[in-house]
Image: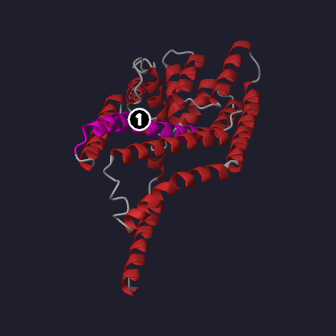
């Protein structure tokens, strides 16, 4: 790479950054406000709120009344808590396509071995997508947890201004981004169309599955049945949730060494295998096609998985 190539590369980066800066400076702020979360994005000015509520439920895989899927309840709950909006039927097509693609690759690279292809089909069509969904759910719940204290403080400020509880919660739906904006919006829509507040909050808890949310639902439920100063209760709850987030992050920093060790020990055999094949392609040539090699690799992968599970148990804390 000579100086002219570097010049062209840096010029391209500069042009891209300039275009992004111009876009951010000239974008319409009111249009940005309409894009703050998905509920506002699908809500046209003349849209029927009930139709929007049913649409949001359907694309999440819920029934029209807001109930969880009945078939394969654990998988349906996982899909709902991921916040995926492509719909359950399209997601099943993605599962099937992933399984067919991975099985086709295995069939091609194993010289048409039907046994390995049959094993790869459920692995690629079910196990791998479920693992991806679990990772997406964890990421969504972590984002919800970060937004949650701010949302409660917004509710408290609205209550201090004299708004009723449903109106105070609808402020979160209008002012905050996803995932918390759409979830609170669906909850307030349910209250608007006949559900009581406690039931709507319980439905939101089932849709999200975040571990701090039951504290909020319980506090509002007790206050609605026994009375009390909800503003003070929610303010104290905000402090508790912030302390829990602080404790989680402290535990995560303490356990960082164990997580990095797990990543390194998992990646090292794979990297060594790739490096040996790159430097000496015939290194495994004499044993690569033998059945014992396949079972040895399967055993090594299983043993590596057991080690990762043990390390995960050692660095995982619940409180």
198 relative position to 287: left or right: right
Which x, y percent locates residue 183?
A: 52, 31
307 drawn magenta: no
Q: Is residue 228 above or below residue 154?
A: above
Query: In which image quadrant can residue 5 be found?
Result: bottom left
Q: Is residue 134 above or below residue 66?
A: below
Residue ID at (43%, 25%): 76
As drawn, the residue found furthest toward the top would be 225
Residue ID at (56%, 55%): 264
171 relative position to 106: left or right: right
Query: In which image quadrant can residue 130 be found?
Result: top left
Q: Is residue 127 above or below residue 107?
A: above
Question: Would you call the spot at circle 1 few (<14 residues within 10 Å), some (14-19), or many (20 or more)?
Answer: some
Q: Nearer the viewer, residue 102 or 98?
A: 102
Find the magenta span and give its range.
112-141
138 drawn magenta: yes
Q: Nearer the viewer, residue 306 or 285?
A: 285
Which x, y percent locates residue 116?
A: 31, 39
As drawn, the residue found furthest toward the left would be 112
Q: Is residue 197 above or below residue 102?
A: above
Which x, y percent locates residue 198?
A: 60, 18
Which x, y percent locates residue 273?
A: 43, 58
The residue pinned by badge 1 equals: 127
Q: Nearer the viewer, residue 310 or 155?
A: 310
């Amino acid at each position: 790479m000579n100086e002219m190539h570097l010049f062209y590369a840096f010029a391209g980066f500069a042009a891209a950054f300039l275009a992004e800066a111009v876009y951010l400076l000239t974008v319409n702020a009111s249009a940005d406000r309409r894009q703050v979360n998905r509920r506002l994005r699908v809500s046209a000015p003349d849209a029927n709120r009930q139709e929007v509520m049913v649409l949001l439920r359907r694309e999440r895989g819920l029934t029209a009344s807001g109930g969880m899927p009945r078939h394969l309840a654990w998988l349906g709950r996982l899909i709902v808590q991921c916040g995926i909006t492509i719909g359950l039927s399209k997601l099943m097509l993605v599962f099937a396509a992933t399984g067919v693609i991975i099985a086709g690759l295995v069939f091609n690279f194993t010289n048409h071995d039907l046994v390995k292809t049959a094993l790869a089909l459920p692995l690629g069509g079910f196990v791998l997508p479920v693992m991806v969904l679990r990772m997406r759910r964890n990421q969504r719940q972590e984002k919800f947890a970060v937004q949650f204290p701010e949302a409660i403080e917004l509710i408290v400020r609205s209550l201090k201004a004299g708004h009723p509880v449903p109106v105070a919660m609808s402020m979160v739906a209008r002012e905050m981004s996803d995932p918390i904006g759409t979830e609170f919006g669906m909850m307030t829509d349910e209250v608007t169309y006949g559900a009581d507040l406690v039931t709507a909050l319980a439905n939101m808890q089932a849709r999200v599955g975040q571990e701090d949310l039951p504290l909020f639902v319980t506090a509002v439920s007790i206050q609605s049945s026994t009375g009390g100063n909800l503003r003070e209760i929610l303010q104290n709850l905000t402090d508790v949730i912030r302390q829990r987030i602080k404790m989680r992050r402290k535990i995560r920093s303490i356990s960082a060494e164990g997580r990095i060790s797990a990543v390194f020990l998992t990646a090292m055999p794979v990297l060594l295998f790739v490096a040996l094949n790159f430097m000496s392609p015939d290194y495994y040539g004499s044993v690569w096609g033998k059945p014992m090699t396949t079972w040895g690799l399967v055993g090594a992968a299983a043993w590596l998985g057991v080690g990762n599970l043990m390390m995960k148990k050692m660095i995982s804390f619940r409180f």
